[in-house]
Amino acid sequence: MGDKIEFLSLQKINAGYTREYLGVLSKILEDGWYILGKNVNEFEKEYASFSRTGFCVGVANGLDALILSLRSLEIGQGDEVIVPSNTYIASWLAISQVGAIPVPVEPRIDTYNLNPDLIEAAITPATKAVMAVNLYGQAAELGKIKKICNKHKIYLVEDNAQSQGATCEGLFTGSFGIINATSFYPGKNLGALGDAGAITTNDEDIAEKIKIFRNYGSRVKYFNEVRGYNSRLDELQAGFLRIKLQHLKEENIYRQRCSDKYHELLQSIEGLILPVLAEACTSVQHIFLVRTDRRNELQKYLASHNIGTMIHYPVPPHLQTAYKELGYKKGDFPVAEIIAETCLSLPMGTHLSMEEIEFVAREIACFFKIQ
């Protein structure tokens, strides 16, 4: 196959929506309303309905969504928040930004999501919340985690940035926590054409707090109730997201087909570990992650055959320079470290044909045969 198989192609993914995007832009220019207008209001209703929650509030990006979620719960200086040891660093950064302390707990080695069996041992009198991350598109074991949170009277907050449309025990991610944050970064399954994010909740008072926080701490212009933020979902991005939300279900189904094809073609390869679903959980296949002790060689081999891959993520948060003051060292969270050292993300998404998926799988098989 001559052309490069890209890990991700936003051009191909968005090409089919060009005419509708231009229609949204034209209408916004005609109306002359650019901030917190009709598109934001309508998208919030539509995304709340999609998530099966009472309320959605659009914000500027996924990190802000996490920060404002924690702040709305009055989590701050000295409080502790349990968080996966292997998540993207944004989950930790949000906790730090409000003055709280991230308390890492290991994931399961097969699903890569937070291990509920380890949570209670990490709870202290300072624990205010568990931040459950639905990593790589798969729902965490949210039902089990929620029971633990209820038992200990602490909050469940979902980081749902990668799994819009996944389910646990028949319920959608983004609906389990008292508050749930998501991202619409362009590479997400539901991606904007720039930064964008949202918060979902069933608590009307919390939703109202977020609306105030995102708008300079104001519900009436020039009257500021609290020290807020400028973190509003852009009207244009909301318009684009409304278009893409209509197609999210079918695009997630296509991603599942790609995943099924990878599993079919790769399952018998010795030395290659494929993703596993937790019981009663589904995945929207945001990332198709495999693991092998020969990750670096495999990535180099695939690159030489014009196949793009990525590593999600090469350095766990506890080993990042940004968190050196916490004093963690290599070996403190071995599961997160093993995942970081062995994981490789294969091309996944609606920009790919089934023939390209098959080509990637054949080349992976070739790599293991010739080594």
Image (cartoon, rainbow, N blue to C red):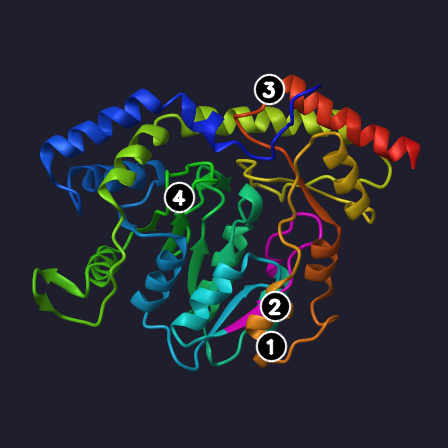
Residue type at the position of mark 3? Ser
Residue placed at 27% from the left, 46% from the top? 54
Cβ–Cβ below 8 Å for labels 4 and 2? no
Residue 228 image point, x, y percent: 23, 67
Disc 2, SS = loop
Assign the magenta stretch its main secondary structure.
loop
Tag 3 residue: 353
Q: Residue at x 45, y 72 (%)?
A: 96
Is disc 2 in contact with disc 1, using a CB cutoff of under 8 Å?
Answer: yes
The quadrant of the image that shows the C terminus is top right
Are the residues flagged by discs 1 and 3 in contact, CB closer than 8 Å?
Answer: no
Q: Is residue 34 left or right of residue 317?
A: left
Q: CA separation, marks 1 and 3?
A: 43 Å
Relative depth, front residue between 71 and 318:
318
Expressed as whole percent of the image width and height from the top left, the position of residue 135 reads 56, 49
The secondary structure type at the circle numbered 4 is loop
Q: Is residue 360 magenta?
A: no
Residue wearing tag 4: 184
Amino acid type indicated by mark 2: Gln
Instruction: Name the residue carrying label 1.
Output: 324
Q: Nearer the viewer, residue 152 or 290?
A: 290
352, 262: nearer the viewer: 352
**Sequence-wise first label, 4 or 1:** 4
Which of 333/143 is in front?
Answer: 333
Q: Amino acid at mark 1?
A: Lys
Q: Earlier in the sequence, mark 3 or mark 2?
A: 2
Image height check: is 42 above or below 319?
above
User: Where in the figure is residue 364, as x and y percent of width and height?
Assistant: 79, 31
Left or right: residue 161 compared with residue 2: left
In the rendered structure, which segment of residues is drawn in magenta?
102-116
Q: Which residue is mark 2?
A: 320
Q: Earlier in the sequence, mark 4 or mark 2?
A: 4
